[in-house]
Image (cartoon, rainbow, N blue to C red):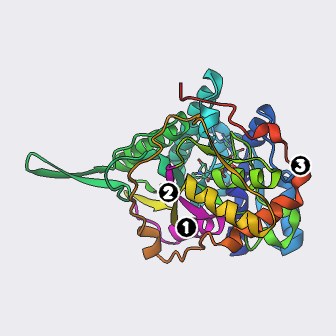
Amino acid sequence: MGGDGYLGWPTAMSFAAKGHQVCVVDNYLRRQMAIETRSEALIPTPNLHDRAKIFESASGYKMEVKIGDCADYRFFSNLFKEFAPDAVVHYAEQPSAPYSMINFDAAHLTLNNNLNTTFNLIWAVKEFNPNCHIIKLGTMGEYGTPNIDIEEGWLEVEHKGRKHKFLYPRQAGSLYHTTKVLDTDLLWFYVRAYGIQVTDLMQGPVYGIATEEADIDDRLVPNFHYDDIFGTLINRFLVQAVAGIPLTVYGKGGQTRGYLNLKDTIRCVEIAMSNPPGKGQLRIFNQFTELFSVNEMADKVKRVGANLGLDVLVRSIENPRKEPENHYYNVVNSGLKDLGLNPNLLTDEVLEGMLRRVIMHKDRISTDKILPRVSWNK
Ligand SMILES: NC(=O)c1ccc[n+]([C@@H]2O[C@H](COP(=O)([O-])OP(=O)(O)OC[C@H]3O[C@@H](n4cnc5c(N)ncnc54)[C@H](O)[C@@H]3O)[C@@H](O)[C@H]2O)c1
């Protein structure tokens, strides 16, 4: 679900190349939102049917493509019955915090789309194949930045001499992140009520466009967004470095998050799929490999940019987001490593490879998409 997206497309190629029977479904919501908000990707990508054809002729691996809305139960349940999957990877959500904070319409779309895709998947599984494993993408942003250690999904609470294990308390910083909190609650309810099996991956920001399959042909490149609404921090900084715009550090720059390479996202999903939690289980992993603050990331990009002859400046600008800019952040992330994740780290070579790709497309950078256009800090 969401097979045309940044993560969905390379995941689909990787699973097909490993011999799985893959069906990708997408309704191009993301491409539409990008056009509506003037947030088009840096590198143009073929549509999903064409991508699948190019992949098949370049690699020999096939996948099925369906264009349709997973928030429409009639469409989705028919597809689910017809394809009869053993596992579903659910990426099909509106994934941008700034987008979800634009106005009523954007908030409404985010809430309805994200909750309904999850709800429809739960119901299709419950009705047509209760053994199907749901692998759902959540976000580390569900936890917020509490002043205590963040555990892997659950917290054992001792209260007046008695103990109970609860979902770790969640306090998100945007409506988008809040829809992920609500998704987790929905999944947990249906796991308790009907014994379905779910892996909920609390993922940090992902970077990278190189994967084994994407590297076969330039036209298979994953989506690369660098604007203020859909671009993640690393993409934004790389493009700013190439465009000669000072890196936009929001506020004090102490905001710390757990990052991971796109190759590791694919590996984590694969690990989750190969090790299902078992019926009646909601299993939660914190999916990231390294912690960086915004300031640390700016320093890295500045240093690597200098190696390529770029004179990178860093400037703090008013934070458009309501969020702590210096905070405690200590997070457990051992679950996926215990099951075999061997992280690809953010080395200077990796950053340099991404910078070189951006430089190749320098002429397509549109500088009016770089400074924040959405703010919720007033
Ligand atoms: N990219 C990251 O850094 C990151 C980090 C943490 C969590 N996530 C989560 O991972 C998932 C995938 O993220 P992404 O970066 O690939 O986002 P993306 O927007 O690139 O991909 C999502 C895809 O789902 C599709 N989609 C959305 N709603 C749909 C619907 N109703 N029916 C059919 N298709 C629909 C979109 O068109 C898009 O192609 C999202 O749930 C996101 O919240 C991403």
Q: Which mark is residue 201?
A: 2
Instruction: Say which residue appears at 65% left-offset and 42% top-offset.
Output: 70
Residue range (magenta): 254-279
Indicate the position of residue 262 as horizontal and vertical percent values.
65, 64
Q: CA distance from mark 3 to mark 2?
A: 34 Å
Q: Amino acid at mark 3?
A: Arg
Q: Which of 263 and 164 lies nearest the eye of the viewer?
A: 263
Q: Nearer the viewer, mark 3 or mark 1?
A: 3
Q: Which mark is residue 364?
A: 3
Q: Quadrant of residue 107?
A: top right
Q: Is mark 2 within 8 Å of ligand 1?
A: yes
Q: Establish if 106 lies above or below 10.
A: above
Asked whether the beta carbons under mark 2 and mark 1 sit within 8 Å of each other, the answer is yes
- Any magenta on residue 259? yes
Q: Amino acid at mark 1?
A: Cys
In the picture as drawn, the residue positioned furthest to the right comes out as 363
Q: Is mark 1 within 8 Å of ligand 1?
A: no
Indicate the position of residue 197 as horizontal and vertical percent values.
44, 57
Q: Establish if 103 lies above or below 33.
A: above
Classed neighbour count for the residue bearing mark 2: other residues with Cα under 10 Å, few (<14), some (14–19), many (≥20): many
Residue holding disc 1: 268
Instruction: Say which residue appears at 83% left-offset and 74% top-offset.
Output: 59
Q: Pick whichever of labels 3 and 2 is earlier in the sequence.
A: 2
Instruction: Say which residue appears at 51% left-offset and 54% top-offset.
Output: 257
Tell me the SS state at disc 2: strand
Q: Pick whichever of labels 2 and 1 is earlier in the sequence.
A: 2
Q: Going by the image, does 305 lie left or right of 173? A: right
Instruction: Say which residue appears at 74% left-offset and 36% top-offset.
Output: 33
